[in-house]
Image (cartoon, rainbow, N blue to C red):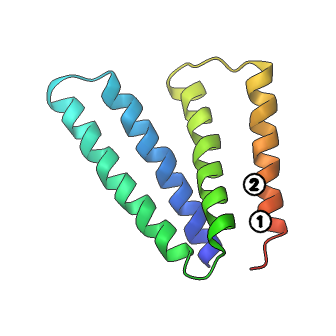
Amino acid sequence: MNWIILIIAGLFEVAFAFCLGKAKGATGNEMYLWYAGFVITLAISMGLLIKATQTLPIGTAYAVWTGIGAVGTVLVGIIAFKEPATFIRILFLTTLIGSIIGLKVFSTQ
């Protein structure tokens, strides 16, 4: 169950990065709404991470959480913000995904 909580926490990390990216291009009240979304999703992500680390090893949990956030944020950047999807970016993204899977497979929990 805590692995599921950790995955959800990672997805909320992607959400707060998305909100931050949207706030960068916004003005006025829209900017403040995106920043509010950032703070809310950040708090949820951190709360879920805290919950997950009650039973999962901190090193593994933190690495998986940041890895999910990194992979998700790169994908959001490519899809939503039209960042380049070069071969080398996709190659390193693939190695990061493999590392996250390896940490999960060889975890003691």
Seen in the image, is 108 located left or right of residue 74?
right
Position of residue 32 relative to residue 105, above or below, is above
Pick whichever, 4 or 55, lies toward us. Answer: 55
Check the picture and name the quadrant holding the C terminus: bottom right
- Residue 25's spot in the image, x, y percent? 33, 21
Q: Say few, some or many: other residues with alpha carbon within 10 Å of mark 2 (under 14 / 14 to 19 / 20 or more).
A: many
Residue on which the image places disc 1: 104
Q: Quadrant of residue 63?
A: bottom right
Position of residue 21 relative to residue 13, above or below, is above
Which residue shows up at 31% across the image and 54% down it?
40
Q: Quadrant of residue 71?
A: top right
Seen in the image, is 4 located left or right of residue 42?
right
In the image, farthest residue toward the left: 29
SS assignment at label 1: helix
Which residue shows up at 51% across the image and 61% down it?
9
Which residue shows up at 80% across the image and 39% down it?
94
- Residue 61's spot in the image, x, y percent? 63, 66
For the residues labelled 1 and 2, say whether their Cβ atoms are less than 8 Å apart.
Answer: yes
Pick whichever, 99 or 82, lies toward us. Answer: 99
Residue on which the image places disc 2: 100
Position of residue 33 relative to residue 107, above or below, is above
SS assignment at label 2: helix
Tell me the amino acid under the disc marked 1.
Lys
Tell me the amino acid under the disc marked 2.
Ile
Figure label count: 2
Which residue shows up at 49% across the image and 76% down it?
51
- Residue 72's spot in the image, x, y percent? 60, 42
Check the picture and name the quadrant holding the N terminus: bottom right
Seen in the image, is 95 located left or right of residue 5?
right
- Residue 65's spot in the image, x, y percent? 60, 57
